[in-house]
Amino acid sequence: MFNVLVVEDNRDLAEVLGYCFTMKDMKAHVACSMFGAIRIYDTSVKIDAIVCDFNLGDGTAPELITRLGRRAPKVKFLYSGTQFTAKQHPGFSEYLLKPIDFDILRSKMYKHLKGGSHENRVGC
């Protein structure tokens, strides 16, 4: 089981994404702000991946990753409602544009976490 940290300032979307990850043999940890995400890290939970909106209300995803430093997981997904490039925000494993298709997100997540895609694709 993988621990996924969902960081999204829209509480409803954060809870839906968290629920979908929980339903998909992953354990979701949900934060609705940058500092909420840092508090989760401070609890000593081993986070395998972050799925993060760009704007977090109290900071940005790149700022969160910088603040986490070496504690940040290797697998980091960034999504936004605005198109951007890896050159603009380096250090993320995947860059996704809203609206997010959960099956695509999950497939990409497994590819990074397990080194291959996960075939048992079921919508949440």
Image (cartoon, helix red, strand yellow):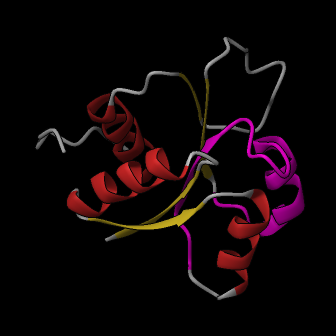
**Can you give x and y, in whole percent of width and height, for residue 79 in the image?**
59, 31
Going 31% across and 71% down the picture, which residue do you hit?
A: 1
Front in this rendered view, residue 26 or 70: 26
- Indicate left or right for 66 with 16 as reference: right
Q: Quadrant of residue 69?
A: bottom right
* Magenta extent: 46-73
Q: Is residue 69 above or below residue 60?
A: below
Give whichever of 40, 110 is nearer the camera.
40
Q: Is residue 83 magenta?
A: no
Does residue 89 appear to the left or right of 49 in the view shown? right
- Figure quadrant of residue 18: bottom left
Image location of residue 74, percent across then percent down: 63, 54
Is residue 109 or residue 41 the one in the foreground? 41
Q: Is 53 part of what is drawn in magenta?
A: yes
| 35 shown above or below 32 | below
Q: Where does the C terminus fall, quadrant-wise?
A: top left
- Going by the image, does 58 lie left or right of 1? right
Residue 81 position in % (x across, y down): 61, 20
